[in-house]
């Protein structure tokens, strides 16, 4: 099977609004919170100090809880901290 790696194309703002209107508010909020968790996970350096390690693991736990909400709507909505861009 041939796999094509197509570049992502930005969508206009009004299309994003239509998509967001079709998603249940609880799932939309979980997606926003998951992106916030990804930003925090990227900011933390777990090997620097014990406090950062604890914060890192706590943020991973919050991301897991948000992923449960996202997966309940559709399995492809799940966000992975390891698949994020550097």
Image (cartoon, rainbow, N blue to C red):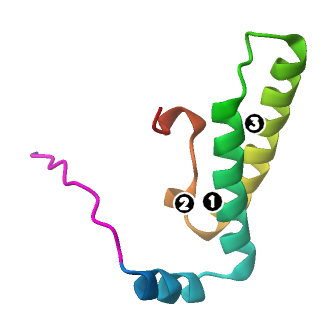
Q: Nearer the viewer, mark 2 or mark 1?
A: 2
68 above or below 22? above
Q: Are marks 2 and 1 in contact (CB under 8 Å)?
A: yes
Q: Which residues are magenta?
A: 2-11
Q: Secondary structure at mark 3?
A: helix
Q: Residue 66: x, y in percent? A: 74, 55
Using the numbered discs, state the Cα–Cα distance from disc 1 to disc 3 in whole angstroms: 16 Å
Residue 9 in magenta stretch: yes
The numbered disc on residue 60 is 3
Whether residue 10 appears in magenta in the rendering, the answer is yes
Residue of label 1: 71
* Residue at disc 2, secondary structure: helix
In the depicted structure, whether residue 28 falls above or below residue 53: below
Residue at screen point 63% across, 53% down: 35
Point out residue 12 in the picture as x, y percentages from the top left corner.
37, 80
Q: Is residue 39 above or below residue 19?
A: above
Disc on res. 52 = none
Residue shown at 28% from the left, 58% from the top: 8
Residue nearest the viewer, comparing 61 with 8: 8
Q: Quick one: 58 or 78, which is closer to the camera?
A: 58
Residue under label 2, please give it.
77
User: Can residue 67 be seen?
Assistant: no
Mark 1 residue element: helix
Tag in front: 3 or 2 = 3
- Number of disc labels: 3
Q: Main secondary structure of the magenta part?
A: loop
Disc 2/disc 1 C-alpha distance (Å): 6 Å
Give me the residue at 49% from left, 89% from top.
18
Q: Is 63 positioned to the left or the right of 79 in the image?
A: right
Q: Earlier in the sequence, mark 1 or mark 3?
A: 3
C-beta proximity under 8 Å, tags 3 and 2: no
Q: Earlier in the sequence, mark 2 or mark 1?
A: 1
């Amino acid at each position: 099977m041939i796999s094509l790696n197509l570049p992502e194309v930005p969508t206009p703002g009004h299309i994003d609004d239509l998509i967001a209107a079709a998603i249940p508010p609880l799932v939309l909020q979980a997606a926003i919170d998951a992106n916030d968790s990804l930003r925090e996970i990227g900011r933390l350096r777990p090997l620097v100090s014990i406090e950062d390690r604890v914060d890192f693991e706590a943020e991973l736990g919050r991301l897991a809880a948000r992923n449960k909400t996202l997966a309940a709507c559709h399995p492809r909505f799940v966000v992975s901290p390891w698949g994020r861009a550097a």
